[in-house]
Image: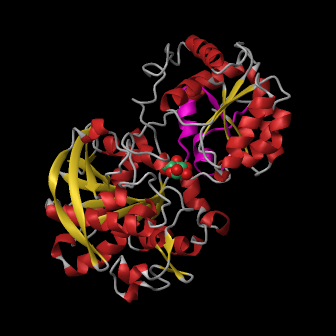
Amino acid sequence: MINVVFVASEAAPFAKTGGLADVAGSLPKALNQGTIDGQPVNVKVFMPLHVKISPSFRDQMTYLGFTTVNMGWRTQYVGLLTLRYDGVDYYFIDNEFYFKRHALYGDGDDAERYIYFSKAVLAALKMIELKPEIIHTNDWHAASVNVLLDYYRKHDPFYQGIKTVFTIHNLRYQGVFDPYIMGDLLNLPYEYYHEERLKFYENINILKGGIVFSDHITTVSKSYAHEITYPYFGENLDGIINKYSHKLTGIVNGIDYDVYDPETDSNLPVHYTVTDLSNKKIIKKQVQERFGLPVNPDVPMLSIISRLADMKGLDLVQHILDELLTLDVQLVVLGTGEKRYEDLFKHYQYMHPNKLSARIFFDQHESHLIYAASDLFLMPSLFEPCGLSQLIALRYGTIPVVRQIGGLKDTVIPYNKYTGEGTGFGFMNYNAHELLFTIKEALEYFKDPVAWPKLMTQAMQADHSWETSSKEYLSIYASLLRKA
Ligand code: GLC
């Protein structure tokens, strides 16, 4: 048995703010199906016991015991609970001081909360005498694990020999803090405060520590792995990424094909398959009724399901919204985020109630309905490490219009009118009118009774399950285990 400990600050369905949670909630399940050199793999997921984890899950958890960690001069409690869900063992780090908070991030003491979390995971492993072959951490919130392990290995035989993998889901969030945390929270000697280690200008950069101190680094698509070696996408870390590019691999994300399946999805009133798409129109009709849009199967329905954040390219949408809404289209927007975008879509809904429906909240059930009902899915991101929404759209036969960068480039094949190949539409430059022209091009094909159904079929047939990608992770684990 190969034991892997997978560490993330969030995992669906327990707590979710973004795509990291979807990956942490689906990749371990896929990894558990695999083997390494003939041996079964057992992935255990460690995450904080966030207060928002619902009582229905809490009631099923088993308490395993407690230990403590030192945070500067304070000794902090580490409770450990476990729950088996969908074939995966989840372990929850309990400390109300750090995790009985309204928000997962952004309270001003993120450094302390997530360094605590990283220390607590390492302490909990020792408490339950679980020495894994591999620890796989995700994003800066868990990257202190890799840094601490480098030190612990030298001082405590329990931690010796554990290999580490670190996955970057978004290079923009790095965990940059004042150097005082070095001694006070990480309790590491000052030799770690060095340009080649954690030092980043005059600060500490925890994600940089994850890069330096991991045996292998991955990011969530091949194109993004390449892009972040350049200054434009490198977020001031391209230098260090280049230095360690020999241990960097891009592995595109998958989605859970059991959760996202138009044939069985319990969120949908009726179901459809790649061989019979007729019910998709019925769902569109119901969504039009529910959202107060004119009921008309022939009007193309465009959708955006997204955090309303700058990186999602919404300023491009803003720029062309007037022009877009002069066309014979309907636009449905679901999500929350920056106030200026929430206000923008509410305003346009007020101005064009027959064309735009702004759902400024997040609702899982409604998101599935919109994926299924729409004809086109817009995702013009400024940068996109992988992106999961376009994968869900493809699975539901909803044609993505994307900017061809990062994971969007790797997962959406632009339609080729000569060969008929492709699964969506794409544009290159971060330019609002390129987006508009690409939407217009897609709308031309929407009217084509031969090309469009073919595109939908091809989109639905593209395989974005975890099947292939999980094997790539397993082969990285295997190669690390072969090294002394
Ligand atoms: C982050 C990235 C997104 C990626 C997700 C899961 O949210 O922004 O592109 O799909 O992580 O890896």
Relative depth, front residue between 102 and 396: 102
Task: Decide whether residue 402 is among the magenta residues.
Answer: yes
> Is residue 207 shown left or right of residue 323?
left
Q: Is residue 355 visible?
A: yes
Colour scheme employed for the rendering of this structure: secondary structure
> Is residue 43 shown left or right of residue 214?
left
Q: Quadrant of residue 76?
A: bottom left
| Identity of the residue drawn at 51% across and 66% down | 174
Q: Which residues are magenta?
A: 387-416
| Identity of the residue drawn at 33% across and 63% down | 117
Q: Quadrant of residue 329?
A: top right
Q: Percent from the top left, x then y, of residue 255?
A: 45, 38
Task: Decide whether residue 361 is among the magenta residues.
Answer: no
Q: Percent from the top left, x then y, of residue 318?
A: 77, 43
Q: How many marks?
A: 0
Q: Percent from the top left, x then y, of residue 408?
A: 61, 45
Question: Is residue 43 placed above or below 217 in the rendered structure?
Answer: above
Question: Is residue 446 placed above or below 306 in the rendered structure?
Answer: above
| Identity of the residue drawn at 35% across and 49% down | 51
Q: Is residue 215 visible?
A: no
